[in-house]
Image (cartoon, helix red, strand yellow):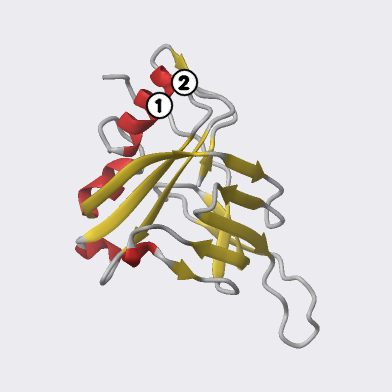
């Protein structure tokens, strides 16, 4: 899930909008045959929807080029209301009735205290530094059978990142 705090696509401002790519992969992601669903913030106007759709289809750089390359069965985009509360590992996201996520820290198994864990990836294509945690809640419910799952209590991460250099068209 990406929440855009500032930026534009060509002349189209995107600040304040969100989009999400959710997927099912029958094997390792890089092996392809992925079913992927793109969700775009319904408050986007027509130009913003077109810009976010272009980005999400991998037509203009960023990590979406890779996501698009492994996706054999693209679904969407679907437009839905996004409710996003960004507070590192205390973040929450709700996208209509489709998707719900609430992050939390990994707890020390002996003391039950929150662990502070980071993953540095100097060559990472989505971000350079991640805060590792867990999903308190992570549920996806769609009309597509492959894209219905509950991964609550499993791996979760949070990161800030900057993308630049994409060009409209």
Which residue extends farthest front?
143
Q: Quadrant of residue 108?
A: bottom right
User: Is residue 44 among the parts visible in the rendering?
Assistant: yes
Q: Residue furthest top?
A: 11
Horizontal arrangement in the rendering, residue 106 relative to residue 55 (left or right): right
Q: Residue 85's spot in the image, x, y percent? A: 69, 45
Front residue of 34/76: it is 76
Kindly indicate the quadrant of the structure image that contains residue 23. Answer: bottom left
Q: CA distance from mark 1 to mark 2?
A: 6 Å
Location of residue 56 by image quarter:
top left
The disc placed on residue 61 is: none
At x 20%, y 64%, the residue is: 31
The residue lying at 32 percent from left, 43 percent from top is: 76
For the point 31% across and 19% down, the residue is: 168
In this rendering, does residue 165 appear at all? no
Q: Judging from the image, what secondary structure is the residue with disc 1 in? A: helix
Asked if 153 appears above or below 85 in the picture, the reply is: below
Indicate the position of residue 5 as horizontal and vertical percent values: 60, 30
The residue under label 2 is: 45
Q: Position of residue 74 (x, y in %)?
A: 25, 49
Q: Secondary structure at mark 2?
A: loop
Q: Position of residue 151 (x, y in %)?
A: 51, 71
Name the side, left or right, on which 102 lies relative to 151.
right
Vertical placement of residue 134 versus 15, above or below: below
Q: Which residue is mark 1?
A: 49
Q: Residues within 10 Å of mark 1 (few under 14, many from 20)?
A: many
Q: Is residue 166 left or right of residue 19?
A: left
Is label 1 in contact with label 2 (beta carbons under 8 Å)? yes
Quadrant that contains the C terminus: top left
């Amino acid at each position: 899930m990406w929440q855009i705090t500032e930026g534009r696509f060509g002349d189209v401002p995107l600040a304040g909008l969100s989009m999400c790519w959710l997927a099912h992969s029958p094997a390792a992601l890089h092996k392809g045959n992925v079913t992927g669903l793109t969700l775009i913030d319904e408050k986007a106007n027509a130009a913003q929807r077109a810009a976010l759709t272009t980005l999400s289809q991998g037509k203009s750089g960023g990590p979406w080029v890779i996501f698009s390359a492994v996706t054999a069965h693209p679904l969407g985009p679907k437009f839905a209301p996004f409710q996003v509360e960004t507070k590192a590992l205390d973040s929450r996201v709700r996208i209509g009735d489709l998707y719900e996520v609430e992050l939390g820290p990994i707890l020390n198994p002996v003391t039950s205290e929150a662990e502070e864990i980071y993953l540095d990836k100097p060559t990472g294509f989505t971000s350079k530094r991640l805060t590792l945690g867990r999903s308190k809640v992570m549920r996806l419910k769609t009309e597509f059978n492959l894209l219905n799952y509950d991964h609550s209590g499993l791996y979760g991460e949070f990161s800030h990142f900057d993308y630049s250099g994409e060009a409209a068209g």
